[in-house]
Amino acid sequence: MPHETFIDEQDIAIIGMTGRFPGAQDLDAFWKNLCDGTESIRPLSDADLEKLGVDPALRKDPHYVKASAALEGMELFDAGFFGFTPREAELMDPQHRVFLECAWGALEHAGYAPDRHDGAIGVFAGASTNTYLIYNLVPNADRLGALDMVQADIGNGGDFLSTRVAYKLDLRGPSYSILSACSTSLVATHVACQSLLNEECDMALAGGVSIQVKHPEGYPYIPGGIVSPDGHCRAFDAKAEGTVFGSGVGVVLLKRLKDALKDGDFIHAVIKGSAINNDGSHKVGYTAPSVEGQAAVIGEALGAAGVEPETIGYIEAHGTGTQMGDPIEIRALTKAFRYKPGTPRAAKMRCAIGSLKSNIGHLANAAGVSSLIKAVLSLEHKKLPPSLHFEKPSPEIDFANSPFYVNTTLADWQAPANAPRRAGVSSFGVGGTNAHVVLQEAPPVASPAASRPVQLLVLSAKSEAALEAATDNLAKHLQANPGINLADVAHTLQVGRQDMAFRRVMVCRDVAEAVSALQTRDAQRVWTGSPTAQDRPVAFLFPGQGSQYVDMARELYASEPVFREHLDTCATHLQPLLGLDLRKLLYPEQAQAEDAARTLTRTGIAQPALFSIEYALAQLWISWGVKPKAMLGHSIGEYVAACLSGVFELRDALSLVAARGQLMQELPAGSMLSVQLPEEELRPHLGAELSVAAVNAPAFTVVAGPTPAIEALQEKLKDRGVNAQRLHTSHAFHSAMMDPILAPFTARVRQVKLSPPKIPFVSNVTGTWIDAAQATSPEYWATHLRQAVRFADGLKTLAQKPQQVLLEVGPGNTLATLTRQQPAQGERTVLSSTRHPREQSSDEAVLLGTLGRLWLSGVTPDWKGFYAREKRRRLPLPTYPFERQRYWIDARPSGVAPRPAASAEKKRDVADWFYVPSWKRTPAPRPAATKASSRGWLLFADVSGVADALAPKLAQAGQPVIRVIPGESFGRRADGTYTLDPRRREDYAALLQALQKEGQPFDGVVHLWSVMPEPVSLERALDTGFYSLLFLAQALGSQGRSEPLAWWVASTGTCKVESADAPSPEKATLLGPCRVVPQEYPHITCRFVDVASGNAATVAGQLLAELESSASEPVIAWRGRQRWVQTFEPLRLEADAAPLRTLKQQGVYLLTEGLTGIGYALAGELARSFKARLALVEDKGFPPKAEWAQWLSSHGAQDAISRKIQSAQVLEASGASVLVLGADLTDESQMRQAVTRSLEQFGRIDGIIHAAGGLRQGATLGTIQETGAAECASHFAPQVHGLRVLEKVLPAEGPAFCLLVSSLSSILGGFGQVVHAAGSHFMDAFAERRSEPGTYPWLSVDWDAWQFEGAPSMAGSALARYAMQPEEGLEAARRILTHAPGGQLVLSTGDLDARQRQTASTAQASGASGKKAATSQHARPSLATAYVAPRTDLERTVAAVWEQVLGIQQIGINDNFFELGGHSLMATQLRNQLHAELKVDLPLRGLFETPTVGATAAKIEQELSKNAAASEKPIGERLRAAFPTERQGIMEDYLKRKIAAGLRITVEQLPADGSLKSYDLNLLGAEVEYSLRQDFKFQLYPHEIQEHAAIPELARYLLAEMERLANPAKYVSDKPLSAYTLKPYRKHAADSASAMQGKRKNPPMVFVHSSPRAGSTLFRVMLAGHPKLFCPPEVNLLFFENMREWRENIGFGHEMEWTTGGLQWAFMELMGIDSAAGQALVDKFVAENTPAQEIFARLQELSAPRLLVDKTPSYALDAETLWRSEVMFDRPKYIFLYRHPYPVMESLLRVRFDRLFGPSLFGNAEVDPHVVAETVWALCNRNLLDFFSRVEKERVLWVQYERLVRDPTAVMTGVCEFLEIPFDERVVQPYDGKKERMMGGLGDPNILQHKGIEKGLGESWKKIKWPRPLDPTTLELVARLGYEVEQAAPPPKPAQPKPAAPKTAYTAEEAEKLLANMDQLSDEQVAELLAVLEAEKEKD
């Protein structure tokens, strides 16, 4: 009985599957394991568990089961493939990640690419409990920084499993997550089937995933529980005691069977029926199974399948291996099968049973689909794999009285007689939800259909490495399946894979040839490339006479039906005209080949033959989706182009070509000569008889004429050494010898119909685009055969669109060869369709190779058209080779609790600001689960033997070691060891270059050069320590490395851990780079280990333990066997605690750098509180006190030394005695003399404050890459060398204390602080070393930031919230000087631990954001300016804004805005974004003058400082609080400041009368407009400042306008709309429309029409995101005839004056030119008076193939203007955007549009603004409705604004369908910051204030109370548009004011004072003030 008998409408096909299981990464490995009886539950050794960090006590527990069914690689994911940032990926549930990859794989396994399937695809799946969240993320919450909890939920919530797949794969069917415990994935399969049967979707993904992060570690056994005590699952066996839970994932792709058969899908099996139910409560307990429930669901599934139980040959059971579950399941199955022993029916029942859980464990939510996949594979392979561990049945199972037996060996599955194989699959969930599926084997497959003799295989991937892997995988698959149908393989790869960036194609005849090509990558058969553009246009080139040959395209005639049909059509039409069958000449029998070749050379035959071949070949390409966007023919080839373009009908074209050839044939013979000279050089050599016949290339010219003249010319040229060759032609084509046939041919052309071309093609006569007049002129076609073929010029014309691919469509490759000889072709792709006549290749292979290379170039073929005549099938082929990386946040080691979250805010109590260094013992580190390094270690080897002991240990672990030792110069020894000079930066760069060249990678560095047993000099310590680390970091940075790098630095004796330790300050400088390197290079982790001198092997073991561990502490120390980590413990310093020391009245204190910064603050405290005597050490050149007055007089107060002198004078005035000493801190003799003078002057020294070690005010910090010798010297001089000198010169008896001003950078590091941090560490260690044995304490204080008056503002800096005001710093200093012990003291105003973690997470985030930017922004262009990274937080913020606005990565501080592609219009957007980020206003002129990040940041810092210093209230608040008489002055002052800032002058430099007429009012207007909008939300228009061009006048006008805007109700009139007379909005020339009627229309484009303020800018920006649309801001062209009229009238009525930039910007974007060039181009159009229609045409041409969109709302104000688009364009399309009247009118009112539209509509600017607003809305919409009524409905799409913002995806999907372009996600992401959207604020100055589409805007009309009733005509319009309005009541008559109740805040005294200036008050203000006085009198 045929299988078709067993197929019905309810059947569901399984067409794709994928899965990953314990021990099997794919289905092939899975099936092999099943067949081999492999148990994938792996036993674990103690060593395994120790590596995983399992507690030793747990490992010894006898109930701990050391077995694992884990999923290998659960931590890996290809984040980049799916567009996730590394941070997103690492925070995402691995179940989501793995399932997403498998969903993609299932679709590819079925031969489907999600972006190519038109139908809806559903997703139904579920995941287990998220253990990654529980064990890995939550315990590490303190390390993860600030998390967006919504994002964390989306990444980890089970609700989002399916919908994430739908989103990432763009699937449009139903998608939701399903949870029913263990039955989840089979329930999901059932739901998917029902969705398909209900036709909710056309395909469905179903499956489940379960990943338990603890599975690799084993599990605890609980007696009486569900899990197995020994790690084995013994389903149905007497020894069964429980299951083993495992991790895995499975996904199947389902489709209705009838559709799958129709579509040629590969069917793995058929789901005949399925069912789900629940046990209810009739069972022992909630978690217990139920016989009744299971039997019912199985019976229901059998019923749904319509099959009898006896036809089921195998049951894949739930089979958990539990003592309760297995017997219940068998009883339920027996009951469902209605088995009765001894009956005839029972005799027929014999059914195998098995359980996958015996192989891989219980996969929980993925168990059901895993069992399903096993059963499908069994059906597919017709094998029954063994169920494991079954020896003796459970005594509770009565197999004898059931139809079932446990299948324990691999067995062939015999099909029952006359029926297909069938299986059942069960899955039962805890909680009682049961599922059962009935499967049937796939129906038999028909024999493969016939196909082409050769096949085209295509491969693509998202990276080169993935492409290579995909190539290898396909080769292995084909080699393993030699019988596979190659045509189906090719078809599957073409239609079933997404096109990606890296591509490869090959042409082959059979599988063996394919395997060979794939394996060898044979360049003759395999082509690889990456398209530079998608959907690239193609231009067809048609060759001319001379390219024909016998058998051209013969193989195509045999194998390509489309080609054959069109060639047959041509031959049939030509037969009566030629008197022969062209096909017999083209494809003759062998014996007639020579005769046919001779005949084919005859012009009368050759031209029709060429035309026919080229036409048929072009139609073949078109049927394959390769359609020409342009064409160029050579001579007769132009006829093919014209025919395809619609100029000729085919029959007419054939008759003309035949007539043309015959007329030429009848002419006298002539000759043609090809000469290698340019045309202009050849012409002087031509006589009257010769003509230039063709210019094929700049140096290839063809001459034609009588043969004698040609021969003479050839000899003449030969004598001159010019190469010239005769062409094999019978006649002198394109010469004067053609003149006799011109008239008859013209007459012949007149007999046919000629139509304008529909596809552009280039004329041979002109070398430019043909126009309709030429194409339809018979004279043109006569001229065409006479004049020269200007082929080279034609190629130049095509070169205007370099993105086009040139495709030769005809025999041979003549034109392709000529094209490649043209200059400036660059990388242009030029291809031929057929072989060269002498080439012995297959026509089909050449053609398919060209198709493949077109695809490589970015052309998208229509693969359905390619296979239109074949019935092909999809096959399961290797799926995408994901490039997985580790994205994993490791769980904390057991016993390590998360730190409580500490606030990183500034603490209020000063006593809580202090910390002291401490050390905490920790256990030896545990090895990481994943090795930290695998590619190798760069080992900077010490001389004490540690490296010698460590290197072999690393090598034994399979990690290569590259040794580096100090030497005299860079080199490499014979043993492979490298040497370098530690002091030479270039040696480190040479080392990395050599390693790269030698192919010696490394991802770890171990630096041991500071492991030295004996003390070393400062110079050597710095050379082999600090400088070595600095230079290596710089070399790594210059190399551009971004891969993760683990860097370990070790030293001896650096830290003071134990009391006997003497820390080395010289080596402590190592810690500076260790802190800062990871912050500036986020891909590098840097850890420091301090070891004790001693046994090298012991030290090596300790270091190896650190290298292999997962510990993250930054500073570690080993002392003996004890491991210590550095901590900082709080030390409360109370103000009233008992002092350790006291400060003396009139004490003597020596301070370095005591006249600035912290030193000056401390000196001031000593002066004020203790009348101290101060010895202040300043630089050597400081003038003596006697010269201070003269210095101040000659140098001015702002000089640096002058300011210090003034500071010294302030100290003296405070009561201090001051001695200023000039000395070089690093010069011992000068410093000794300074100390001596101090002792001589004051007699003693009571204390030392070394403030020169702090960060000097205004000091420049440089990044590591920028740090050189000068930067190091400037920091080390005071911090290192000066401190050493200071210790030497202090008196022997010593002071009471020595306070060192160090920096918190020693703990927190900081961008740009590598040297300062190192110097601070030196000071800290110096104080630690000196404080113990000395007679006086040395105290190094790591100060937090101070904010001094006059210092640069810290706004925008991370330190701003922690900075101390001077009073706070001094309070801290008092406590330090009197209470702090010696050594290192840390001062942090915020929690130090939290700030350390915050610093670390910021560095990680910086790395993550960098990677993110790389996926969403363009690479940094090649610039003359070298990249210099931002140095401060503010510069980084500014650079980030530039990067967002410009869409460019890595913008440095010196990069020029305009060199990066910015222009004046985009500068507006940049300024607005900077304002939004930093709340500071920048004048545009400032940006133009210094257009760099560094300069912009400096200006912002100045503005922030001004803002911080300004104490006055905001201008708006000041105006509101001021008396009316004061407001004019306040506004004038405001305008003066803003205008002066914009002009870059002082206020004093403005004209005394305030006149502005001498300035650029356009630029000035933009500045004032911006300031008013920011400060008042007031919109000023340029004409207003021009009409009020003096500050007093402008101030009065603005105050009046603001009053008008604040009280619009005052201006509401009750005059009806009909009482107002409207002017014609735009007066057109009387004959303008008629003048345009006869003109050729432009191609179609799109107009977006709306009223102003209806949301059209948002809509335009949304459209601009689509790659197939070009949507500039308002171009304002449609109003005008020409550009002169445009220029003269663009500002008419003022309403377009602020949109004049749209046209300029459009050309700038399209042509890639700057603002100046854009303005010049527009000026040129104006000067040439270019017609507006031609400007439109230029825009269309430049934007092609994109569709041009014009959004100019003001068009709608004029009905005649609207109709002009119908006259100018061929069937344009229109989008009507309409919006509720209230928000439109309210917006018009708010932005004062009455000041724009009032004069042009009413002839009066003082019309009620409400009337203007209503008129604009009504007039526009009425005009549009009338206009659209005259246009075909299919060309108009209505878009309601409210629906657009409420459901943008649905609306924009409809818009894309209307425009016949695919939907693109970017159209609903308008605020992505892309400059291509041209969001400069044109059209809507407020567009940049939004961050996203705000749904609430659609409801805003409900909150608006319009004060004036709408006119009846307006109400009619409102109803037509489907809106409702709440009408206002008619305005009441104005009531007389009641003087007794004035609504005022004035007192009587104030009112009287104001009335003294009555002439300056308005009538309303006078009345208001009089009312106040009247009320006061009544009180009296």
Image (spheres, rainbow, N blue to C red):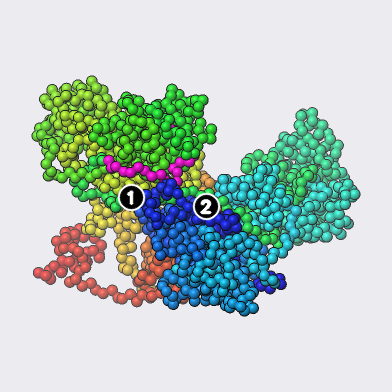
Type of amino acid under label 2? Phe
Circle 2 residue: 81
Q: Which quarter of the image is occupied by the C terminus?
A: bottom left
* Residue 163 visible from this viewpoint: no
Q: Which residue is more in the foreground, 1547 or 1417?
A: 1417
Q: Quadrant of residue 864?
A: bottom right
| Number of marks in the rendered image | 2
Q: Quadrant of residue 403?
A: bottom right
The answer to whether residue 681 is above or below residue 357 is: above
Q: Residue at x 26, y 36 (%)?
A: 1058
Q: Residue at x 88, y 52 (%)?
A: 589
Circle 1 residue: 896
Can you tell which mark lies on residue 1621?
none
Type of amino acid under label 1? Val
Residue 379 placed where, x, y %? 63, 64
Q: Which quarter of the image is occupied by the N terminus?
A: bottom right
